[in-house]
Image (tube, rainbow, N blue to C red):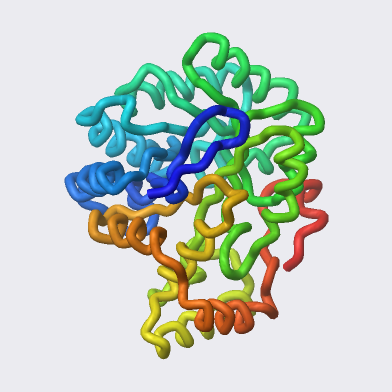
Amino acid sequence: MQYRKLGSTGLDVSILSFGASSLGSVFRDINEEEGIRTVHAAIDAGINYIDVSPYYGLTKAETVLGKAIRQLPRDRFLLSTKAGRYGVDTFDFSAKRIRESLEESLQRLNTDYVDMLFLHDMEFESLDVIVEEGIPELNRLKEQGKIRYAGISGLPLDIFPMTIDRAGVDVILSYCHYSLNDTTLLGQLPYLEQHSVGVVNASPLSMGLLSSRGVPDWHLASREMKDVCRQAALYCQEQGVDIAKLAVQFSVSEERIPTTLISSANPVNITNNVRWAEEKPDPAVLQAVLEILSPIQGKTWPSGRPEYNRSIKV
């Protein structure tokens, strides 16, 4: 496993990290014991960073993860969780709720601190609330030693400079914007580097778009995006290559992005993902897939309030 520096935090993170959303049965119903074994397999394979949220499985992911990491020395992994989103349409970024949420998460996770706390899907809240209540509370929690670093997360890329221009953070978590079909996160990197902000990239499979299993029914991508990604997956099958493998290899290969989160609740799958990350993709297959995906390159879908989505390409 390779490790990279996460902005100016001083943390060394594995290039492939563990997204614990799957432990909340958000993709399929999981066996709790299998989930625990998956976490242990990830750590044993060299992954040293785990991300979770109370929203995933409505606290189930944190609960299962807490049981898994209770059996591990705390210095074997870095841990982040989130605050602000608690249901499909349930958001609260007030200072009081963030503080309460962290305490609840710490109890479920069986730890007395997290390395990073992100404001979860902040695009569903006004910027004034985020910079006047949310981020100041993160900074207070840093001073109290409950968290080490403060972050924000969300889908629209515009939220990051809009927020950081008014209130600095240590890290950002972006998803579905550095993958085979969407590399628009690269455009943000000079700004983030200038402000010494660490970057966590999530969902190299674009939440199932880049999968031979097909796209989940709930996915918000357009029909065009789904159809083109399906073409790419079929091409990979014809070449004897799993498009998920190619997607993981592509995402971890960008050295300016410290780490990429991937989620699984299967020990074999997470071990395979680590092995894939250590291999180089077939350049001919990679180039062909990028060409197939070129009509939808950089296309996404809106999320949250309109002011955060003005520059997106759909």
Residue at x 40%, y 65% (from the top left corner):
279
Q: Residue furthest top?
A: 144
Image-quadrant location for residue 163: top right
Q: Is residue 211 above or below residue 106?
A: below
- With 218 as the anchor, is 136 left or right in this view? right
- With 314 as the anchor, is 146 left or right in this view? left
Judging depth in this view, the residue of 85 and 45 nearest the camera is 45
Judging depth in this view, the residue of 256 and 58 nearest the camera is 256
Q: Is residue 150 above or below residue 226?
A: above
Judging depth in this view, the residue of 15 and 262 nearest the camera is 15
Residue at x 55%, y 38% (from the top left corner):
90
Q: Is residue 121 above or below residue 131?
A: below
Residue 164 at x, y percent in the picture: 75, 33
Residue 31 at x, y percent in the picture: 20, 51
Residue 107 at x, y percent in the picture: 34, 21
Image-quadrant location for residue 314: bottom right
Residue at x 37%, y 85% (from the top left corner):
240
Residue at x 74%, y 54% (from the top left corner):
187
